[in-house]
Every structure is written in C-alpha cells, then in structure tokens.
Amino acid sequence: MDWSYNNLTGTGWSTSAAGRSRAYLLGGTAQSVTANGTSDGANWQVRLIFNTGPAPELDISRGATAIADGGTDTVTGLTAGTAGTLTYTLANTGAGSLTLTNPATLASQTNCTVSITTAPTTPVAAAGSTSTVLSVTPTAAGAFSFTYSIGNNDGNENPYNWTVSGTAAAAAAPELDVTRGATPIADGATDTVGAAFMAGTASALIYTFTNSGTASLTITNPATLGAQTNCTVTITTVPTTPVAAAGTTTTELSVTPTGAGAFSFTYSIANSDANENPYNWTVSGTATAPAPEMDLARGATAVADGSTDTATGGASGTALVLSYTITNSGSANLTLNIPVAAPGTLTNCTASITAQPTTPIAAAGTSVIVVSVTPTAAGVFSCTLTIGNNDANENPYDWTISGTATGPQPEMDVLRIAASVADGSNDTLGSVLFGQALTVTYTIANTGTAGLNLTGAPTLVVATAGANVTSATVTTQPAASVAIAASTSFVVTYNVTAAGAFSFTLSIANNDSNENPYNWTVDGTGTAMPEINVTRAATPVADGGTNAVGNVTAGQSQTLTYTIANQGNVALTITTPVTVAGLVNCTATVVTQPGTSVAAAGTTTLVISVTPTAVGAFSFTVSFANNDADENPYNWTVSGTGTALGGGVAGGGGGGGGGALTSSGTGGWLVVLASVVLAGFAVGRRRRV
C-alpha cells in the first residue's frame, strides 16, 4: 500500500539523514514504517509491511548433520553403479505452518543419477517435520555431485537449496591373479619352466588362482590347452569355482615332453575378471633325454668321483670293512661293469671286494659294494677302486680309500656278570645288606689285538671307600697280563655302614691307550633285608642250581639234610610246606620241615628222604617261598644215581656209606648174610685143600 504525504513535520515522524520513520501499533504488534525522501516538503512514498500472525522456519538435516540453506552436504559410502539412499528431514522450527512446494528441483547432476523416491508432505505444522528420500547412483568411481532446491513459505529461506557431493568407491569386482609357486604369471605372459623335464616322463605343474578382487570370481571349466609343441598335456585337477574374494584354487597339469629339446603349449581359461577374460599364458621349457646318474656314499658321507674317502679306526693286521652305497639319481637304468675289479694301487695294505654290486640299477634305486681293507703295518695306508658304468660324465667312477692304521692295541673291557661296565661309568648294585661283608666279582676282558697289561703298583686294582662304606678291599686280585681274547677276574669285598645310599670307586692302571686308568663308581643302597643261604654238609646249594648226591642203592631210602642260613640283618621268613616235585625214578618226601622264621645270623634245617625206584639216574626239585628279595622262591634240583644192591652209596663212611646219606631197610642184612656164606665156603675149601 502506498501513501503520499505533503508535509510530515509535526505528525509524529522522526527525521534522520536516511529518511523519516514513525512507529505504529496495529493489532498489538509493533510495526515499522519507513518513508523515503530527501527533504521535508517533498512527496514521500511509504511502504507499510504488516505482520499479521506467527511465521514458519525451515531447517533441514541428514541424520545428525544440519544442512544450511545454500550449504553442501558431503556424503560417504556410495559405490559406483550401486544406488544409495539419502534421507533428509525437513523440520518446521517456527510458530506458523510451513508450506512446501513439490516436487523439489534436482539439478547439476555430475557423475550420478538422482531421483526422489519419497517427497516431503506439506503443510508441516509448527514443531513438526517431514522427510524426503533420494536415490543416488554414482555413474563411476570418483567425485559426484548434484543440487536440491525446494520452494516454501519461510520468509527468508525460499527456496531452500543445497549441494550434495561425495566420492564413489569402485564397484565390487573380481580380480584374477595366477602364480606357479612364488612365480607370478601375468595374463598373456610366458611361464618358463626350465630344464627339469625329462623326455618321455610326465611331470606336474601346479598353478594357483587367487581372487584379489572384492567380488566372487567365476571360472569356466574346462580350460583350453593349445599349441602343444613337442609335448602332450592334460589337466589332472581342475580349479574350483566360484572363488570368493581373497580366496584361492589350484589347477594341476601333467606335461610329458615327447623328445629332448624345447617344448611349449598354451593355457587359456574363461572367467569373470572384466579385463582378463580369458586369462591365458604360454608354458615353455627344455626337456632332456633320460640318463643315469651315479652317486656314491659311505654311510651319510658322499664320496665324489675322483675324491678320497678317509677311513678311520684301522689297525694293522685287522680288516677294516667299508660298505658303499651306489645310488642312481638319474632317470634311466644305471649299468655297472661287474665284477668290479679288486682295489689297486695298494699302499701298506691288502684289499678285496667282499660283496659285488648288482646291475642294472633302476632310476632312484641303489646297490651296495663292500670293500675289506687290511692295513699291513701301522701308518698311512691307501688303495683305489674303479667302477665302469654308463653315466655320461662319470665313467669310470673311481675313488681312493685312505687312512692311518694303528699297531696292535689292547682293548680293555670290564663286566659284572654279563653286563658291561664302561670306563668312567657307575655300576649300580641296587639294594644290598648293610653291616655285613659283601662281595662283588668283576671280569676284565681283552678284546684288542695285543696283550693287555695291568700296571698298577703295589696293587693292580685300587678300591677306595666312599660314602656310607666302612671298607672296600680287593680280596682277589686279577692277573697282571691278559692275552688277546682272554679274561681275568677279581673280587671286591665291601661293607656298607648303614641304611641309605653308598658308593666306592675302583681304578685299574693299564696299557689301553684310551682307557688308562679304567675306573668306575660302584653304588647302591644299604638296606635291612634277609639273605638266604642253603648248604648240604659243607657244600653250597645255589638258588636255581643242582645238588648232586652221588650213588644211592635202588629201593633204599636215604636222608638228605640241608641247612638254611639267614645271612641277612632282619628275620628270614620261610613259607612251608616245602615243595618236592618233578620226581624222576624216585620217591621223595620232606621228613623235617624248616622253621618259618629264621633270625638274622640264624639257621634252620630241612630234611628230605629219597628212595631211587630203580637202577639209573634219578632227580627231583625242591622249592620254597621266602622273603629274600632276589631269591624267592628258592629252588634247586637234587640229582643222583640209583645203584644195584651192594653197589655202594656215596658218603664219607667206609663200606660205601656214611656222610650225609643214611641207609635203612633189609638190604644191608642181605649183604652181611651173603658175606658170611661166602667166607664159610672159602674156609671150607682151604681146609679141604
């Protein structure tokens, strides 16, 4: 509404250099009225703006991000070729109703296509909101943008517009990479497989397909093999499909070169890699003709053609046996010229081949040749061997055997029973009685090639008591000299002081070059224990042994008395009755059972009656359980010979009797009667003469 005034002086207007103004009160709301003009008295044009009610206020956000009018919304997470969704909230934060003008305007679409999938509703009440949804599809990877503008009745933000921008990621796609072992094989490249191939022999090539992309890789089987030159190729293992992102699969090819020389072929496989379909490469190599390859070794030591094999341990006059393994590491049969000639160029030795190798030797096969070398005297010895063969560059295969022989040498070994006691070792006796004199016997054997001399003075074997040992003495010294392959023994008497671990040492000076002195530690544990010992008269009866009782008259009973002694330091317990078994040509019974408990140092008696059934050998076994740790049960065999009447009996008494055997029955009276009759007959004859 325009108003014209001629003179505003005195009418309530205020005047300033910029113009004149006056306040009005309309409907309870203060309004501003501005008059345009340059001087009093001029005509004025007055524009009155009347705000007659509450006003709307449009605010826009995407999630928690406020989008200012005229601003830029930078979005992330969109992928080229894939539609993404952007949702904007249009809020009315004013006091009046907000009116929106649909459809909004989408413009300046750069590297993308955009559409409105959900338009905002209108009107929007004060403090209310609505939303609009946009579908955005970046055309390609890289930056994209567009503008959005919507008309409305917000007094100062109409239209409300902003720019949307972002960077699209590349679309998920597979990426095929091929390797053979650690060697990458590029699409269209050549894989040179070298000269490890043999003409006429199939070899395997394994290729790994890796999907280094971000989408599943599809492989189309079978692959195509082409341009096969001087070879035949088959696919023995096809790759699996599909291959997940970051996954792998393999294919295996069997390649057989037709002949020696260069060979090649091509491999091509279709796949879903956008820029490497099909993936193809050429395989090339050089095949060699099949050939043998001779290698030689003694044990784990390789012996090269033309080299020297240094043997150790040789002694003059003693054969040194050397075994060599011939290996064919080639691809064709290895033929040897056999028999291999005897070793030549002999220096200070004699030598022979004791086992010839076999021929031919198949590829990867082996054969053995055994050579015996006997040094003649101490000092350096050597000989040469030559084997003709069909190895192209090692024919003949020859080598030298050399070494240094020692002169005849003794070799000292010590044994307890059958167990070897090494120089510097421990010989453990286990649990033994304490408080009593005990013995242990050792044997010294000479397994060398010269006499063994024991050189200790003043005693050959020195015993030194150690922990928990009252004394250790060599009570029987060995012989001072031990011939080749001979032996000698010595006995040590020792006394363990108390219960617990004990030890003592033995040392023998000698002329063994590497075991002088020969020494060892004897140890064990002193223990309270019984120790059983059985005798008949003064004769020991060993556990597991045989007690020979001599001649016993057939049909007559004889008594055998055995003394069972406890040589231990705690009570010996005997389980009765004693068992008599295994009777051969006799009857036997226990006349007197032994006591069941024998104190330390005590004895008890066992009496057995035996009657041979007939003339000839007889025997039976005796056995009883006890608490001796290493002699339970204690058993022995009784043996003897049944004799005819008058044949006499064993023993210490006259007339064939006495001793530990006692006769009973009528047989003795018959002998006496016969003697009397014969004596009378003789007297009568003398009288008649």
Image: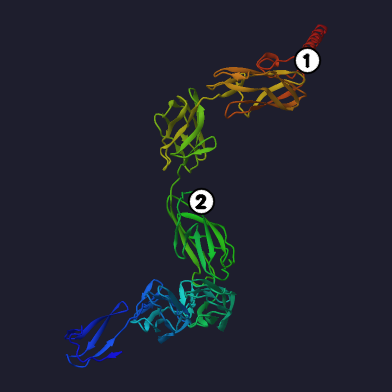
Front: mark 2 or 1: 1
CA gap between label 2 and label 1 equals 69 Å
Extreme residue toward the front, this view: 10
Q: Is residue 449 above or below residue 471?
A: below
Q: Position of residue 150 (x, y in %)?
A: 40, 83
Q: Position of residue 39 (x, y in %)?
A: 16, 91
Front residue of 672/174: it is 174
Mark 1 secondary-structure assignment: helix
Q: What amino acid type should be assigned to the residue bearing mark 2?
A: Ala
Extreme residue toward the top, this view: 687
Q: Which residue is mark 1?
A: 667
What is the total number of numbered labels drawn onto the structure image? 2
Crowd class of label 2 (few under 14; some 14 to 19; many from 20; radius 10 Å): some
Relative horizontal placement of residue 391, taking residue 66 as reference (left or right): right
Colour scheme shown: rainbow
Tell me if I can see residue 86 in this picture: no
Q: Splitting the image into 4 quarters, where does residue 10 fall? A: bottom left
Residue at x 40%, y 33% (from the top left corner):
456
Crowd class of label 1 (few under 14; some 14 to 19; many from 20; radius 10 Å): some
Q: Which residue is mark 2?
A: 319
| Picture quarter with the N terminus | bottom left
Front residue of 143/325: it is 143
Q: Is residue 483 above or below residue 173?
A: above
Mark 2 secondary-structure assignment: loop
Front residue of 108/312: it is 108
Q: Position of residue 378 (x, y in %)?
A: 43, 49
Relative horizontal placement of residue 148, taking residue 651 as reference (left or right): left
Relative horizontal placement of residue 112, taking residue 369 as reference (left or right): left
Q: Is residue 650 above or below residue 480?
A: above
Residue at x 44%, y 54% (from the top left corner):
403
Extreme residue toward the bottom, this view: 43
Q: What amino acid type should be assigned to the residue bearing mark 1?
A: Gly
